[in-house]
Image (cartoon, grey):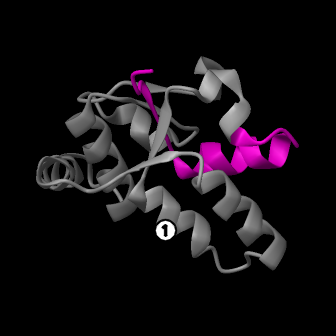
């Protein structure tokens, strides 16, 4: 299936906390991917317990993780300049733009970005 959605970090956390169903078998997520930035954010959270770390790692094994390509980097630079985004938000947005993906997020800062399509969790 063609990837359509790039999940922001806050969405992955919300989904993992809201259900005991493994993320990889939820039908609405069949076309979802994440940025390598999300992987880093999930696994480096300061108060991450060993149990949460294992849940995140299990989830990540079933998701496609997109790299920061040269094009994504250039988009991130332009978006960060234009919208004064945090580095992680710029990289996730730049990745979405480079791969032509809709960002699923609850981050209101990303709603300002005209160059990408942004939707809330209800889009899933």
Count of picture labels: 1
Residue 110, percent across and down?
41, 39
Residue found at x 62% / y 42% = 11
Q: Is residue 3 magenta?
A: yes
Q: Residue 28 placed where, x, y %?
A: 64, 22
Helix, strand or loop status at disc 1:
helix
- Give the residue drawn at x 39%, y 22%: 2
- Disc 1 residue crowd, few under 14, some 14–19, many 20+, Cα 10 Å: few
Image check: 56 left or right of 9? right
User: Closest to the observer: 33 or 13?
Assistant: 33
In the image, residue 6 lies in the stretch drawn in magenta:
yes
Question: Which part of the image, by quadrant, shows the C terminus?
Answer: top right
Name of the residue lying farthest toward the right: 20
- Quadrant including the N terminus: top left
Question: Horizontal placement of 106 versus 14: left or right?
Answer: left
Report which quarter residue 103 is drawn in. top left
Q: Which residues are magenta?
A: 1-23
| Residue 112 location (% of width, % of height) | 36, 34
Pick the residue in front: 108 or 38: 38
Q: Is residue 100 left or right of residue 7?
A: left
Question: Up-down: is 43 above or below 22?
Answer: below
Provide residue 95's location: percent of width, then percent of height.
29, 45
Q: Is residue 41 left or right of residue 25?
A: left
Q: Residue at x 76, y 47 (%)?
A: 16
Residue designated by label 1: 40
Q: Is residue 78 above or below residue 115?
A: below
């Amino acid at each position: 299936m063609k990837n359509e959605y790039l999940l922001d970090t806050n969405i992955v956390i919300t989904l993992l906390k809201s259900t005991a169903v493994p993320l990889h078998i939820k039908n609405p997520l069949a076309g979802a991917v994440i940025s390598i930035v999300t992987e880093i954010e999930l696994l480096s959270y300061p108060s991450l317990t060993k149990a949460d770390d294992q849940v995140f790692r299990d989830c990540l094994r079933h998701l496609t993780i997109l790299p920061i390509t040269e094009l994504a980097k250039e988009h991130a630079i332009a978006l960060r300049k234009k919208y004064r985004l945090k580095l992680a938000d710029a990289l996730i947005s730049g990745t979405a733009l480079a791969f032509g993906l809709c960002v699923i997020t609850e981050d209101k800062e990303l709603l300002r970005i005209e160059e990408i399509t942004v939707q809330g969790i209800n889009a899933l």
